[in-house]
Image (cartoon, rainbow, N blue to C red):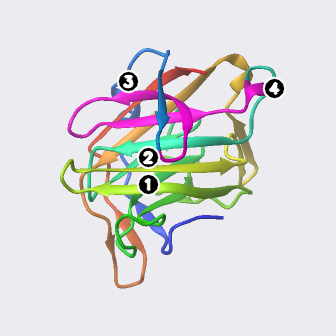
Amino acid sequence: MYCSKVAATILTVAASVLPACHAQAPAGTPYTDPETNTTFTTWEIPGPLGLTFGLALPDSARQVDATDFTGYLKCNTAIGWCGISLGGAMTDSLLLVAYADPNSKLETENAVAISPRYTSTYSLPAPYTGNLSITPLSAHVDESTKSFETIFTCASCLHWSQNGTEGRAKTSSGMLDLAWAISPEKPVIDSTGDLRIVQHEKEGTWVAQV
């Protein structure tokens, strides 16, 4: 499993904030990554604090709910963090939080860390303790464009279970509820060794056609 070298602490906002804004139309845009030769369906949230999220699903995902995917995530912040909810909400969904890893050198496969998180309340998301595996395929941090991006496989990420609560992303429906959040603030490792990630500055939800 690929996870951050230190635990992440995320300062969150009230329940009314997360659905505040939405992304583009459900139909995504194809993008083929030249480094991995993987073709994704992508959705872009434009702007200085936007992001692009892409999915490559198994061919059978429209017939049988997929559990795995290959993901693409580009965040328009060079030193902050961004996150995706695979269930369309902050609570009771698997959250993937990505950031430029301060413990790694740039332009290496570990230049971007991904931390799976989970919460059942609008409080600090804890590390996800369920069975999943995240493997980085490529990662880049670009200070000139103030962005970072990563491509990764996420096995057993489209269904989740923690503290007796289960959920899944139903790819067979052809539509997925997703959510996003982003902050330009640099993560800081505190005196206890925890990685502190400040509250997101922008967030929203969208329905993605897969």
Residue 159 drawn above or below residue 59: below
Question: Which residue matches tag 3?
Answer: 23
| Residue depth check, mark 4 versus mark 3: number of the one nearer the observer | 4
State the residue at coordinates (68%, 40%): 158
Q: Amino acid at mark 3?
A: Ala
State the residue at coordinates (52%, 40%): 85
- In depth, the one of 129 and 124 nearer the eye is 129
Count of labels in the image: 4
- In depth, the one of 42 and 17 nearer the eye is 42
Query: What whole-number distance in Å separates the C-alpha atoms at marks 2 and 1?
Result: 6 Å
- Which quadrant, please, contains the N terminus? bottom right
Q: Extreme bottom residue here? A: 191
Q: Position of residue 82 (x, y in %)?
A: 38, 48
Q: Earlier in the sequence, mark 1 or mark 3?
A: 3
Question: Which residue matches tag 2?
Answer: 83
Q: Amino acid at mark 2?
A: Gly
Q: Earlier in the sequence, mark 4 or mark 3?
A: 3
> Marks 1 and 2: in contact by CB < 8 Å?
yes
Q: Amino acid at mark 1?
A: Ala
- Res. 98 mark: 1
Question: Which residue matches tag 4?
Answer: 64
Residue 125 drawn above or below residue 40: below
User: Magenta segment range?
Assistant: 35-61
Task: Determine whether, in the image, residue 21 is placed left or right of residue 94.
Answer: left
Is 126 part of what is drawn in magenta? no
Mark 3: which secondary structure? loop
State the residue at coordinates (39%, 67%): 101
